[in-house]
Amino acid sequence: MASGSSKMAVYAALAGNLAIAVTKFGAAVFTGSSAMLSEAIHSVVDTGNQALLLYGMYRAGLPADARHPFGYGKELYFWSFVVAILIFGLGAGFSIYEGMHGILQPTPVQNAMVSYVVLGFSLVFEGGAGFLALRQFLREKGDMGFFEAVRRGKDPALFTVLFEDSAAILGLIIAMVGIFLGQQLQLPWMDGAAAVAIGLLLAGVALVLAYECKALLIGEAAEPHVVEGCRALLNGDRRVVRVADVRTMHLGPREILLAADLDFADGLISQEVEIATAELETKLRENFPEVRRIYLETRKLS
């Protein structure tokens, strides 16, 4: 399941987006801005997405049962994938549609100052939520680069919120620029063009998130240092002659399945092999707490 800090980032983003969405809708009705309406829909989609992420976190924390013996950890990956689809289908799709309408049938934005005030306050709220998500992400990524940390990350809730907040901040800036240029240059279609740009931005974010979540749903191995550390621990036991294979898969952000094939020294009786296997499983769990499910295939060399 996801960490408590990830939940905090999601809760902060949900609260911010809910308040912003209501304000943006009011401003969109008041000003008639396509870019503002696109941003309002964007905030509504983000609010729903964060609710889905919280639901995914809840489901991922459920204990294993007879029907799901490996637990529900991958539910978080599934709901994160759904979030990516919603960003693409609702957020990007509506923004591009509304933007094209604004370009083909442009109307001047009324009371532009209202839009600037609303967008300014939205930037403050989104910036605060984004800062919390970024701070946690930087803490989690360690020495890895930004894009490497996203590619190798196993907690989709955290990088989904970070990407959504980043897209929201960029979208607000685009909306501001579109309204300003449309007003200053007397080109009302610029407002619609800004909405299209917001839609394309959301589409790009959605595709990146969908790609990352797809990889997690299929099943990603643990980090190389975890795999090699487990292999070294198994090889270090005097009763083990050879570790034939070590396979790992993430069942959740902090839950790893490990399966290994071990060749034990000739001369060990079955009871000694059982004792050795139990001791190795205990050592693996002590040294690698995230390795929750362990399956050691054992055989004696003849």
Image (cartoon, rainbow, N blue to C red):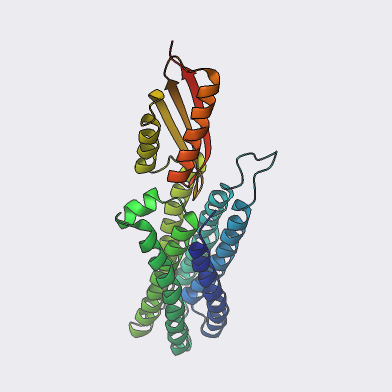
Question: Is 48 in front, or is 231?
Answer: 231
Tell me where residue 96 appears, x and y as whole percent. Answer: 47, 63
On the picture, is 292 further left or further right than 180?
right
Find the residue positioned furthest to the top.
302
Q: Can residue 194 be seen in this view?
A: no
On the picture, is 21 further left or further right than 229?
right
Occupied quadrant, residue 203:
bottom left
Tell me where residue 90 appears, x and y as whole percent. Answer: 55, 61
Q: Is residue 136 visible?
A: yes
Tell me where residue 24 appears, x and y as whole percent. Answer: 53, 79
On the picture, is 229 further left or further right than 21?
left
Find the residue positioned furthest to the right.
66
Please give the name of the residue rendered at 45% of the width and 53% of the height, measured from the top-left corner.
209
Tell me where residue 199 appears, x and y as whole percent. Answer: 45, 63
How many numbered tags mark residues here? 0
Please give the name of the residue rendered at 56% of the width and 46% of the height, measured from the top-left corner.
74
Please give the name of the residue rendered at 51% of the width and 72% of the height, measured from the top-left corner.
12
Question: Is 219 in front, or is 124?
Answer: 219
Please give the name of the residue rendered at 56% of the width and 49% of the height, measured from the top-left corner.
78
